[in-house]
RNA sequence: GCGCUUGUAGCUCAGUUGGAUAGAGCGUUGGAUUCCGGUUCCAAAGGCCGGGGGUUCGAAUCCUCCCAAGCGCACCA
């Protein structure tokens, strides 16, 4: 419908003198339903160009618009010059039939849009996932779902760094713990662990080593496998042991949240394939790289940064930025139309370097979108849950899921825009009542299923071809209008990379349904009307189920 | 100190390209409901959109200054 109106508007506008060729009429759903179903402010926007009163332009536009009465029942000019359109009843019946026909595919785009890469989680395998990683994982997964529904062929990728200092420290931590296990009589030392008591570790434990219990567990496994030789293995062996164990933990956690990656991309492969050197050379060829103080620098000051950035340390080891740039070059070479990175707020100052580098190398950086999310604060009994920054003391994602269920965790991560600090209210999340928005949605779905079961129990059989034109009650009309918006909402959320639009929309659906349910009986009405209402209930169930599917949340038949 | 992000109802937050009387949920107060799942529905109260200045037919939205919070500012990732 929007497309239809948009096309009609454009042709009419084209016939009016003085309208710029590139003028984009805007159509949107007015906030106030008494203003109609769709409205355009085209006349207001044109007032400046045409140097005429907006209302006068609107009147002329309406006069020249040629609209199908079966689709648009009413057009009016209102306020300072808005043009309001109201849908015809016939159109709504068709729209409902369309939902039922498309069923599980309703909301999906018809046309393919290209291929997209979404990079998310991307936590290095140095420890269990934190609550913050959870927000990342769920945001990325849902953005990937949205792009999938919007017509993209989506690849979901997890990038990890297995070549740098972090992994070396991880290996050294494991090795030190092996020593502690095999030579408990050797001297030890204590290291600070943020707000907590200092932790006792073997003397060989590295600076900034990883203090978690899981490191000791990994060390124990190494000791079990190698006995006394467990102290003489190459560092690589400790890293492999740690990496494998920790990745298995991470994968388990992601699976609990129904987050599934298409694949993992490791930093080391960039070295092995010479991509690091090639990227550096390419930047050098563009004159954006120089040597100073034994290090290799990237001229980020050319892009307005205060300082240049080190790409290769004087030790000869690249900083993480160079592989990051090489990785993005690799993404372009793989031919993605759209590339999305989901990063925490701590990357906010660093990703512009990557985009600048891509730009310098001649890639279209507008195809890369970076979704930055702010940090999560867990709130219990109105108070923030203290989380020390040190690695031994934080709430893990697993612990959160243990406490609130995966569906609730996903929903709470998704219901706020990525760009705001998230207060995760644990008490609310655990509450199974209407205060908890995810239960409200699931309940509406379960209730519809219950009605359909009930109908079957009492032997009600709906007409196969119900007369949907009978649905003229205001609550019915409002519900149909809400249901038909799903594809547009999915599209909008996908384009804006804004999953949080969906929970809001689905709540509108649930509200519209419960109002309908409150005012209109289904079973027990005369057969034709009951059939039509059953069809409306089934369509609602479908919209809720499809919407929840996009969010990766279950649509239960009973609760 | 510099950069980025944020500041909207008591609380948590929407507000999509600058548009109509700034919205929702929770909480509060009042009401409805013999009925397909009361995990329901209706209504009311509640706002200097952090503050000042500017841009224009029109600003929560754009510009500018100030205030406050978060994150970042390593030859760490």
Image (cartoon, coloured by chain):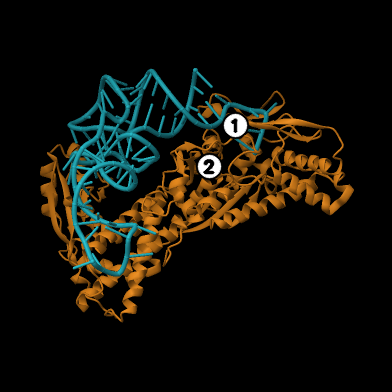
Chain colours: A orange, B cyan
Q: Position of residue A88 (x, y in %)?
A: 17, 63
Check if mark 2 and mark 1 are on a common chain: yes
Is A440 situated left or right of A31 in this image? right
Residue at (73% x, 38% y) in the render: A169
Which chain does tag 1 point to? Answer: A
Is A277 situated left or right of B12 in this image? right
**SS of the residue under disc 1:** loop
The residue singled out by tag 2 in the image is: A343
Mark 2 neighbour density, 10 Å: few (under 14) some (14–19) many (20 or more): many
Q: Position of residue A313 (x, y in %)?
A: 70, 31
Q: Earlier in the sequence, mark 2 or mark 1?
A: 1
Mark 1 neighbour density, 10 Å: few (under 14) some (14–19) many (20 or more): some
Q: Can residue A83 be spotted in the picture?
A: yes
Q: Quadrant of the N terminus of chain A?
A: bottom left
Q: In the depicted view, which residue is nearer to us: A422 or A492?
A: A422
Q: Position of residue A49 (x, y in %)?
A: 20, 38
Q: Is residue A215 above or below residue A335?
A: above
Is A168 situated left or right of A7 in this image? right
**Do tag 2 and tag 1 residues touch (Cβ < 8 Å)?**
no
Q: Can residue A107 be spotted in the picture?
A: no
Q: In the depicted view, which residue is nearer to us: A75 or B22?
A: B22
The residue singled out by tag 1 in the image is: A288
Q: Quadrant of residue A200?
A: top right
Residue at (87% x, 50% y) in the render: A227
Is A539 situated left or right of A546 in this image? left
Q: Is residue A100 above or below residue B51?
A: below
């Amino acid at each position: 419908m929007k497309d239809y109106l948009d096309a009609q508007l454009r042709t009419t506008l084209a016939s009016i003198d003085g309208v710029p060729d590139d003028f984009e009429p805007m159509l949107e759903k007015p906030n106030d339903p008494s203003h109609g179903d769709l409205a355009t402010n085209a006349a207001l926007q044109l007032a400046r160009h045409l140097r005429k009163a907006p209302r006068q332009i609107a009147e002329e536009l309406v006069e020249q618009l040629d609209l199908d009465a079966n689709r648009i029942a009413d057009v009016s000019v209102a306020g300072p010059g808005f043009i309001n359109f109201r849908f015809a009843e016939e159109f709504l019946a068709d729209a409902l039939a369309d939902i039922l026909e498309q069923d599980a595919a309703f909301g999906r785009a018809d046309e393919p849009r290209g291929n997209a890469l979404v990079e998310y989680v991307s936590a290095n395998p140095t420890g269990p996932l934190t609550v913050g990683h959870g927000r990342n994982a769920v945001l990325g997964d849902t953005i990937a779902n949205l792009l999938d529904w919007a017509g993209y062929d989506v690849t979901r990728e997890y990038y990890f760094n297995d070549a740098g200092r972090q992994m070396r420290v991880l290996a050294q931590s494991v090795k030190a713990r092996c020593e502690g296990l095999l030579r408990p009589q050797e001297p030890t030392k204590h290291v600070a662990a943020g707000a907590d008591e200092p932790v006792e570790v073997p003397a060989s434990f590295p600076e900034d080593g990883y203090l978690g219990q899981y490191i000791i567990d990994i060390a124990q496994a190494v000791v079990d496998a190698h006995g006394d030789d467990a102290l003489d293995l190459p560092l690589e062996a400790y890293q492999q042991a740690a990496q494998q164990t920790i990745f298995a933990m991470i994968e388990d956690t992601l699976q609990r949240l129904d987050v599934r990656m298409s694949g993992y991309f490791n930093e080391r492969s960039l070295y092995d394939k010479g991509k690091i050197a090639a990227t550096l050379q390419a930047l050098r060829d563009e004159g954006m790289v120089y040597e100073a103080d034994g290090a290799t620098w990237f001229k980020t000051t050319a892009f307005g940064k205060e300082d240049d950035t080190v790409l290769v340390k004087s030790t000869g080891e690249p900083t993480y930025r160079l592989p990051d740039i090489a990785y993005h070059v690799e993404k372009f070479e793989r031919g993605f139309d759209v590339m999305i990175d989901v990063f925490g707020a701590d990357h906010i100052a660093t990703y512009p370097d990557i985009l600048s580098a891509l730009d310098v190398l001649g890639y279209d950086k507008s195809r890369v979108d970076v979704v930055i999310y702010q940090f999560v604060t867990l709130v219990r009994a109105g108070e923030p849950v203290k989380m020390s920054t040190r690695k031994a003391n934080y709430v893990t994602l697993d612990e959160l899921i243990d406490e609130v269920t995966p569906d609730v965790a996903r929903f709470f991560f998704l219901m706020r825009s990525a760009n705001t600090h998230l207060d995760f209210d644990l008490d609310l999340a655990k509450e199974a009542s209407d205060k908890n928005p995810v239960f409200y949605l699931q309940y509406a779905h379960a209730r519809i299923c219950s009605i359909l079961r009930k109908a079957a129990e009492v032997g009600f059989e709906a007409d196969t071809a119900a007369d949907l034109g009978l649905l003229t009650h205001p609550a019915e009309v409002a519900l149909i209008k809400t249901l038909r918006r799903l594809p547009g909402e999915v599209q909008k959320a996908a384009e804006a990379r804004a999953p949080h639009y969906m929970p809001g929309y689905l709540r509108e659906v649930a509200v519209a349904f419960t109002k309908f349910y409150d005012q209109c009986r289904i079973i027990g009405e005369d057969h034709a009307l009951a059939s039509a209402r059953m069809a409306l209930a089934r369509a609602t169930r479908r919209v809720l189920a499809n919407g929840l599917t996009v969010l990766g949340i279950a649509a239960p038949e009973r609760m």
